[in-house]
């Protein structure tokens, strides 16, 4: 038997597997395939202040190793989410890691405050601050491309959340120095980081010779981006071990389909993992990864999941 529990700041979870934001709506659909309470946490679709219709269609395009999406943060808005979706998640025993976003730093803070005022807030185990969505129409809204913008958003959200609420900043890989952005987010009060969001990509229809997505560009996800996620986790974990960053928990996301995929992110430094794109072709995949990851941890002789976190750093050959 392996102890699969993990602690992310004050958020203690029975296992380290979560959904990835945007890939399972707000839980109702996935719950038909398995109890979402069996996951370590359920990460909601990113919610903003007001309802949004999202971007035009077509919104998705398959790639050879994943997919591009250009949804545009469609959603019901924070008031409807707090009134309908959050109570439902609480009623089925899910541990909700709520993803929030805004078009301005002040809107992020407003969403956080309205979330905290929900009578169902006790279902919230943490907040994921999505400062890195690459499929919005205005690339200037990707706050995580700039350390100063990242710090401002995270600081304002921290001020509006109840004391003790774990807060994770979700970072983009579309930067030259992810460590500097991580430092800004942690300095502003983030308890940990989620790494990584999708990469900005594009596909062209070679029959019609025009972009496949109505929004032209979109977020690339799936197996193709897992090496990028591993690299980002490795860099930030190394910076923490070297004392260049304060130690904080990392949530790894990007191309996880199996327990072995998840273990790769864990060995690079992730204390939890999220399953996203794989859910589209197998809705039970997040739950299966729980069991597969446990089997992988046991195969390597670890009695606790946490023994595997960052293990690759200890086994790297030194000159």
Image (cartoon, rainbow, N blue to C red):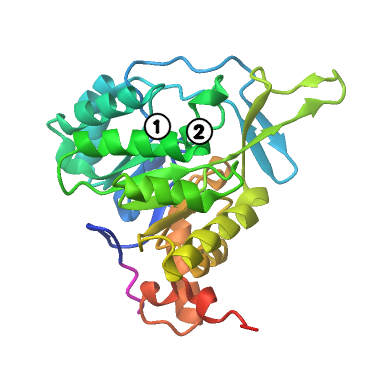
Give the secondary structure at mark 2.
loop
Q: Which residue is the site of mark 2?
A: 133
Q: Quadrant of the N terminus?
A: bottom left
Task: Say if 126 sits above or below 246 in the image.
Answer: above
Report the residue at 24% width, 26% height from top.
84
Label 2 and label 1: CA atoms lie apart by 9 Å
Q: Is residue 127 above or below residue 293?
A: above
Asked if the residue under mark 1 is in contact with the one under mark 2, i.e. CB atoms within 8 Å, the reply is: yes
Magenta region, mostly helix, strand or loop? Answer: loop
Please provide the residue range marked out in magenta.
1-5
Residue 262 picture location, percent across and down: 51, 62
Query: Height in image: 215 above or below 242?
Result: above
| Badge 1 element | loop
Residue in view at x 49 percent, y 59 percent: 236
Report the front residue among 25 and 268: 268
Where is residue 245 shown, x and y percent of the image? 41, 60
Q: Nearer the viewer, mark 2 or mark 1?
A: 2
Q: Magenta span has 273?
A: no
Residue 58 occupies quadrant: top right
Count of marks overlaid on the render: 2
The residue identified by callout 1 is 46
Residue 120 seen in render:
yes
Residue at (79% x, 26% y) in the render: 204
Q: If the image is split into quadrants, where does the C terminus sit?
A: bottom right
């Amino acid at each position: 038997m392996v102890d699969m529990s993990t602690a992310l700041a004050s958020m203690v979870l029975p296992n380290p597997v979560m959904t990835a934001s945007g890939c399972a709506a707000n839980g109702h659909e996935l719950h038909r395939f398995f109890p979402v309470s069996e996951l370590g946490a359920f990460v909601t679709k990113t919610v903003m202040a007001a309802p949004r219709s999202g971007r035009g269609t077509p919104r998705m395009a398959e790639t050879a190793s994943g997919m591009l999406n250009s949804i545009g943060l469609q959603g019901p808005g924070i008031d409807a989410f707090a009134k309908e979706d959050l109570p439902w998640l609480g009623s089925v025993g899910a541990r909700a890691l709520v993803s929030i976003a805004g078009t301005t730093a002040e809107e992020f803070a407003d969403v956080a405050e309205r979330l905290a005022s929900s009578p169902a807030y006790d279902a919230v185990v943490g907040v994921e601050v999505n400062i890195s969505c690459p499929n919005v129409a205005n690339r200037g809204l990707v706050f995580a491309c700039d350390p100063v913008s990242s710090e401002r958003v995270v600081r304002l959200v921290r001020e509006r959340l109840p004391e003790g609420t774990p807060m994770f900043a979700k970072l983009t890989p579309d930067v030259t120095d992810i460590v500097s952005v991580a430092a800004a987010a942690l300095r502003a009060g983030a308890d940990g980081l989620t790494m990584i969001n999708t990469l900005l990509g594009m596909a062209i229809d070679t029959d019609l010779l025009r972009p496949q997505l109505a929004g032209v560009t979109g977020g690339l996800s799936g197996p193709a981006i897992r090496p990028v996620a591993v690299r980002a986790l490795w860099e930030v974990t190394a910076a923490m071990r070297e004392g260049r960053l304060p130690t904080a928990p990392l949530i790894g996301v990007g191309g996880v389909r199996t327990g072995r995929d998840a273990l790769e992110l864990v060995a690079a430094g992730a204390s939890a993992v999220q399953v996203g794109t794989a859910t589209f072709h197998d809705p039970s995949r997040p739950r299966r990864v729980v069991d597969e990851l446990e089997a992988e941890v046991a195969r390597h002789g670890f009695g606790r999941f946490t023994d595997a976190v960052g293990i690759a750093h200890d086994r790297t050959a030194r000159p």
